[in-house]
Amino acid sequence: MPRFLREFFNRNGTMMGSVMLGLVLFWTIGLIILPQLSMLDFSFRPNLPPPEIGGPKDVYTLENYKYLIYGPEGGSQDYNAVDLRVFFRTLVAAVCVTLFNLILCYPIAYYLGQTKGNHIRIFALMLIIPYWINEILRAFALRIIFGESGVLNTMLVGLGIFDTPFDFIRNDIALYAGLGYAYILLMIFPIYNVIESLDHNQIEAARDLGAPWWRIHKRVVIPYAKPGISSGCTMVFMLSAGALAAPQILGGPSSLWFTQLIYQQFNDNSDWPQGAAYAIVLLVTCILLVLAVMRLFKVNMGDIGK
Amino acid sequence: MSAGVGVDLENLWIRFGDFVAVRDANVHIKGGDFFSFLGPSGCGKTTILRAVSGFLDPSEGNVLIGGNNMKGIGPNKRPTALIFQNLALFPLMKVWENITFSMEIKGASAAERRKRADELLDMIALPGQGDKLPSELSGGQRQRVAIARALCAEPHVLLLDEPLSALDLKLRQHMRTELREIQQRVGITFIYITHDQGEALTMSDDIAVMRAGVIDQIGDGKTIYNDPATAFAASFVGENNVFRGKVLEVNGDEALIRTNRSGDLRSRISTANLGKMNVGDDAMMFIRPEALSLAAKGATGDNFVTAQVTHEEFEGNSFNIFMEGDGGKEIKVAIPNHGQSFDDHTGQAMTLEYEVANAVVVPAGELAAE
C-alpha cells in the first residue's frame, strides 16, 4: 500500500477510510469515467438498428469523426461547412463570454474582497439569490427583457435612442448576455476568495511607492489573484461551451450552438454514435484549449483547485 | 539621498463618524529628525501617520510637508514612504523587485534597478540576497528589505508604523540601533509610531506622547521622562509611583502635597504646569522606583514615606520592594544590586526617602492603563 494511502487509513480508521474512499471512487469511476468511456466507445461505432448491434457490421470506425469534417458521403460540399462553422463559432463565442465575464467580474470580486462591512454580505446575497431560480426561467426572463417588444426595447425606443426596436435576439446579444449572466457567480467567487485573502497593506504599499491604480492591479493584485482567475475562467469557458438551455432559448434562429447539434444527433436523429463523436470532439478541444492557455499564463493545475 | 524636510500638523482633527480619533494636533517636526509618536493602542497615532502618508484625509486642519500643504495630494504623489507594521512586502516578487518597485513605476530599466538594488542590499547588509523571495528570508532580514524598499523611493520623510513589533526582543533591540544608524546615514526625517516607550526613548530626537486622540506632551526623551506634563505622560513613559492628594502649599517651583495616605510630601512642580497649580487643587505626585531609597526606620519629614511591604522580588539588576500604596496601586522601590546582602522585609513597615528634585507633581488626571 503506498504511504499516502496508509496515512489516510491511519488518520480516518479502516472503516471510515474505506467508506470515504469507496464513495470518491464510485463518484469518479462509476459516474464520470465509465460513462465517458462508454461515450468514447459509442463514438467509434456505426449507428446501427438494435438487431445489428454486436453483429458483423458493428466494427470500430472513424466515420462519425469524418462526418464532422467532411459531411455526408457523396455530399455536395468538400467539407461539412455548416457543422464546422458552428463548432468554431461556439468556441470563439465561449472565449468571448469568458473574457467578457472576467472583465465584468474582476472589479466586482475585487470590491467584494477588499471592502469591509456588513453591506458586503448583502451584496453577495443579492448575487446569489437569483440563482435559486431555475436556469430556464432565468433564460426566459432575459428573453422578455431583450424581446422585440421587451423592456429594453420599449425603453430605448421610448427615450428616442432607437427609432425601431433592435433585434437583440437575432444579433445574439441576448445569447451572450444570457450565457454571461448564467456563470458570473462561477467567475466572481473564485476570484473573490483569493482577493479576500490579499493583505490590503500590499495595495497601500504599492500606492505609497507611487504606483497608479492600474499598475497596482497589474503587479500586485492580478498576480496574486491568478489562481482564482484561472479557476473562474476555466469553469466559465467549459460551461458556456457546453451550455444548452441558454442557446436554445436565447439564440437567434440562424445561430446554432454546437451543443444543440449534439442534442439533435442524440434526440432528433437518434444517432448516438454521431452525437458521442461530436461531444468528444468538443470536450477534447476544450481541454486542450484550457491546457494551452494555462501553459501560456504559467498556471499550475494545483492552482486551479485553490 | 534627499535631505529631510520638516513636517507640520496644524490644528489637525480626524473624525470617524462621531468618534474623534485625533483632536486638534499641532506638531512641528524638524527636517532630519527622528520623531516618535508614543501612546497606547487606539490613541490615534496610526491615524496621524495615515494622514501624513495621504491614506486618510483630515477632517479639519492641515498636513504640511516641507512647508507645502498636502491637501488633495494622494499617497502616491507625496514625498513620503511608509513602512507597514506587517511590512507588506510583495510575496510574489523577488527581493530586488520589491526593493526597486518604486523605480519600476518610474520606468527605470531592469539593469538600473538591479544596480540600485545591489547598492541598497549592501547598505542593509544583505548582499547577494536579491534573487530570493521574501518568504525565504528571516524576520529581521525582511524588516531590512522593507526599509530598503522605502528608501529606494528616495522619500523626504520615512514613516514607520510599529515596524519592530513582530520581532523578538533581542532582534528588536538590535534593530533599534540599526534604524537609528540608518536614519543618521540617510539624513531624512523619520516619523516613528510606537507603543513601546523603550523604542521611543532610545531612538528619537523628539517624542509626542498621545492619549485618546490628544497629544499630551512633546519633548525630547529626557524631558518626557524627567519632567512629564500630565499624569498620563508620567505614568505611561517608564514605571512610576503615583501619590494622589491636594496641593497644600506652593513655594516657587515646589509644592507641598497632602497625600491621601502618605502624609504631606514635597515635590517639584513639572515645568509645563509652573504657575498653574494652586492651593487646594487635586494633584498627582510621581516618584520613579529608582528615585526611592531605604531610610532609617521611623524617620519623618516631607520627603519620607512609610508603608507596609507586601512582597519583594529579585530582578537581577535590582531588588524590587512593593509596598502598600494609594488607590490599590503599589509603591515600587528598585534598589540597585551591588552584590550586597538583602533581607526579606515582607510584612514590615519601611521608611523610604527621596530627593525633592526627583519627585514631580502634575494636576490630577487620567493614568495610563497597566
Image (cartoon, coloured by chain):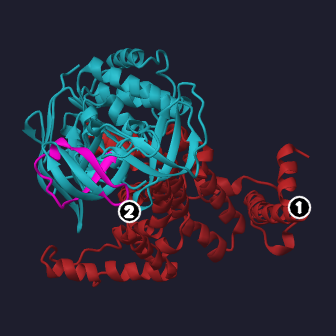
Chain colours: A red, B cyan
Q: What chain is tagged by disc 1?
A: A
Among the 4 quarters of the image, the one containing residue A102: bottom left
Mark 2 = which residue? A116
Q: Please determine whether, in this image, residue A272 is positioned above or below residue A148.
A: above
Q: What chain is tagged by disc 2?
A: A
Amino acid, disc 1: Pro
**Residue at image x 49%, y 82%?**
A133
The front one of A268 and B269 is: B269
Q: Relative to residue A163, is residue B179 drawn left or right?
A: right
Q: Earlier in the sequence, mark 1 or mark 2?
A: 1
**Kind of element beneath mark 2:** loop
Residue B198 falls inside the magenta stretch: no
Residue B264 pos. (x, y %): 29, 53
Is any atom of residue B22 visible in this view? no
Mark 1 = which residue? A56
Q: How crowded is mark 2: few (under 14 residues within 10 Å), some or many (20 or more)?
A: few
Residue B279 falls inside the magenta stretch: yes
**Kind of element beneath mark 1:** loop
**Residue at image x 37%, y 19%?**
B120
